[in-house]
Image: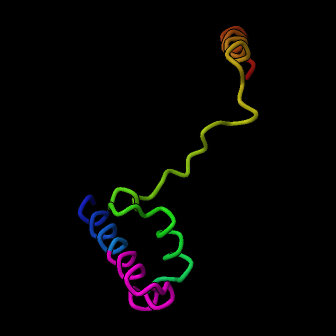
């Protein structure tokens, strides 16, 4: 699995280098069989290293309706007491 990700990062790096070299995202997209918008997204993140082209996590940093610690304690306490009622 690791080698597949590495190969993908190498391809992204080559595409970014080519797009910067010829200064044309559309031509680079045709050559590397991806979309012009994708090349543009990669170039925004690209700083010359493969690490910058790694996929970022889509996991949310926080949840707006998340329970507070007091609420979680109350839920646990009520669950222990009324477990048999569902």
Question: Is 31 contained in the magenta span?
Answer: yes
Nearest the eye: 65 or 13: 13
| Residue 79 vertical placement versus 38 (above, below) | above
Quadrant of the rendering where the N terminus is positioned: bottom left
| Residue 77 vertical placement versus 12 (above, below) | above
Quadrant of the rendering where the C terminus is positioned: top right
Q: Quadrant of residue 46?
A: bottom left
Nearest the eye: 31 or 59: 31
Residue 37 appears at what percent x and percent y? Answer: 56, 78
Q: Quadrant of residue 15?
A: bottom left
> Is residue 83 visible in this depiction of the protein?
no
Query: Which residue is depicted at the point 49% across and 76% down?
Result: 39
Query: Which residue is depicted at the point 52% across and 83% down?
Result: 35
Question: Is 46 contained in the magenta span?
Answer: no
Label count reads: 0
- In the picture, measured across the screen, residue 12 lies left or right of residue 69, that is left
Residue 36 appears at what percent x and percent y? Answer: 53, 83
Nearest the eye: 4 or 18: 18
Given the current orientation, which residue lies at the most extreme left position? 3
The prevailing secondary structure element of the residues shown in magenta is: helix
Residue 34 appears at what percent x and percent y? Answer: 47, 83
| Residue 78 vertical placement versus 54 (above, below) | above
> Is residue 80 visible in this depiction of the protein?
yes
- In the picture, measured across the screen, residue 6 lies left or right of residue 35, that is left
- In the picture, measured across the screen, residue 70 lies left or right of residue 48, that is right
Query: Which residue is depicted at the point 71% across and 20% down?
Result: 68
Query: Which residue is depicted at the point 35% across and 56% down?
Result: 51
The image's colour scheme reads rainbow
Residue 27 appears at what percent x and percent y? Answer: 46, 91
Residue extent of the magenta highlight: 14-32
């Amino acid at each position: 699995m690791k080698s597949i990700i590495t190969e993908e990062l190498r391809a992204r790096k080559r595409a970014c280098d080519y797009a910067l070299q010829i200064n044309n995202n559309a031509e680079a997209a045709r050559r590397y069989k991806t979309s012009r918008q994708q090349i543009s997204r990669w170039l925004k993140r690209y700083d010359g290293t493969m690490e910058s082209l790694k996929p970022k996590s889509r996991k949310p940093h926080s949840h707006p309706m998340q329970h507070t610690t007091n609420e979680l304690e109350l839920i646990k306490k009520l669950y222990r007491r009324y477990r048999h009622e569902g």
